[in-house]
Amino acid sequence: MVSPSNKLHFFPEQGKNLATSLLLGLVVALCISALVLAITHLQRMKRLETLADNFSQYMYSYAVDLQDSSYKLLPLAQQPCERVIPELTSSAAFKLHVRAALLVKNSTAECSSATGKMSYPLAKLVPDINISKRRDLAILAETPLMPGKPALAFWLADPHHAGDGIITTINLNIPPYLLFSAQKEGVSGIALAVRQEAIGIYTGQVTPVAQLGKPRLERSLPDFPIKLLIFAPRWQPQLIQFSLLVGLAAGIVSALLCFYYLTVRMSSGREILAGIKRHQFSVVYQPVMDTQHQDIKGVEALMRWHHPAAGPIPPDVFIQYAEAQGLIVPLTRHLFSLIVKDLPVLQQCLPAGSKLGINLAPSHLKAASFQSDITQFVNQLPGNYFRLLLEMTERAMLEGDDVLESFNWLHEQGFDIAVDDFGTGHSALIYLQRFPFDYLKIDKGFISAIGQETVTSPVLDAVLNLAQRLKMETVAEGVETADQAAWLARRGVTYMQGYYLGRPMSAQQLNEWYCKLPTNSGG
Ligand code: C2E
Ligand code: CA
Ligand code: CA
């Protein structure tokens, strides 16, 4: 017998469900990954924009501050260097970012907060500054006092004297919080560009703008010719990893849910209902013979399921499965309809008064539709031709009073009842007295032990004595040898059933087989 745990492999749907679930999991994983990546990417772009705004605001206030201090120095432009040096120096010293302040007269640097009196053409000192403008900016790769350290030079012209004005050079000090948030967003470079040159904030180097490539973001400072360039890779590896991880988790969860839904919820009996609809079930009939004369006395209807993918599924397996799925009633109704279709053929060979054995599951006996199911079936049988024998296992007796009611009703209708597989269940004698069975079917396990010196034989003896005492007729199941048949005849068993006498056959096969029997070959 196939155990329920082995049942699953009979249903190829499980493999299909697994494949479907895996596919769904994969699709969900990809979709969620893409979605999370898109959302996190958008959020990151927004943060980068904010970062660029903060940066340019900072740079702007920096430039304005510088401009203000230059304005304050402007009145000094027309005074001799000796007089203004202390003020130039204190202005450079007290302004955080100012490297040096220079006084320019006639396009020549005349006085510096750092070096005092001097005379150096401005065009050589800061070639990129356009002193004809009221204000201008330029990038310096270095200054004499800080070689190798780039600076910004700010020019403020004296509006009343052409060629005179103030130059202020400033360091680029970026506050750590800005650098930190830039690093967090995966910014690979920040540059301040003035016209064609740019200072790299991370590298501290001056590079032509044309060599920097395309920045991810760009901001122009109002009023000053400064551009802020932010470089960052489009996709941040951490975000890709995070998105894949979230997608993977979602994929696993949805695959599991899908598998649960398909197997536990949707497949509940789906195969059985589909099998009924697609005509995958059929009935075979096994002859039951009279032990003394070996005449046919009836047949037992046994259901068969040929699954297109799994092949033949043993009845023990699908009956148990149908019971578990609450589908035994539709399945038994289907059995009835299949038998009804076979009736014309069965009537050709089976003599009138033959017993038609049908197996009933205990749960069907308790179903509300039980009586109407049986009545409908019987109404389709040719009047008084077949005698209905309902077979149920000892398990049915454990179901209690509902079943007893069904028993009584069956007897009232004139049907016979057999206890099936007797001796294999938990039969208590008290049940046998309480439930009025007409036949006792001895399980094939006992029959196969006949002739062997096992402990089974004394049990079989006891069962036969018990049947006699309770005035029940006996049917021996699974008779496979002549010796077994002879032994059973000697022991007064009423009927026999088994491969030795006839295998379960289709109605057509049964007809052909019956005609070939020696006793019927003439007729
Ligand atoms: P069961 O009612 O005891 O049926 C007899 C089983 O013994 C059948 O197995 C039959 O093919 C098998 N058999 C008959 N002669 C021999 C023999 O000489 N040797 C051996 N080894 N086996 C023999 P099957 O058809 O596989 O059915 C198994 C069980 O499935 C049945 O046991 C019955 O409990 C259940 N079943 C089958 N059809 C139906 C049905 O339509 N409704 C219900 N409720 N149960 C069914
Ligand atoms: Ca049976
Ligand atoms: Ca049986």
Image (cartoon, helix red, strand yellow):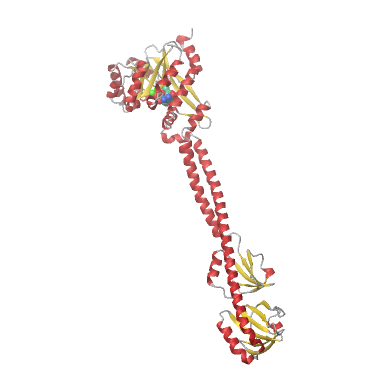
Along the horizontal axis of the image, is 256 left or right of 404? Answer: right
186 lies above or below 257? below
Q: Is residue 147 visible?
A: no
Residue drawn at 45 percent across, 28 percent down: 314
447 lies above or below 119? above
**Picture quadrant of residue 444:** top left
Residue drawn at 55 percent across, 58 percent down: 239
Please provide percent x and percent y for residue 38: 57, 54
Along the horizontal axis of the image, is 284 left or right of 435? Answer: right
Q: Residue furthest top?
A: 522
User: How many marks on residues?
Assistant: 0
Q: Is residue 96 visible?
A: yes
Along the horizontal axis of the image, is 127 left or right of 319? Answer: right
Residue drawn at 52 percent across, 46 percent down: 25
Please provide percent x and percent y for residue 32: 54, 50
**Picture quadrant of residue 186:** bottom right
Residue drawn at 42 percent across, 36 percent down: 5
Please provide percent x and percent y for residue 20: 53, 41
494 lies above or below 99? above
Along the horizontal axis of the image, is 306 left or right of 53? Answer: left
Image quadrant where one finds the N terminus: top left
The image quadrant in which ligand 1 is located: top left
Please provide percent x and percent y for residue 197: 67, 73
> Front-most of 246 and 109?
109
> Front-most of 520 and 87?
87
> Front-most of 193 and 7?
193
> Front-most of 407 and 218?
218
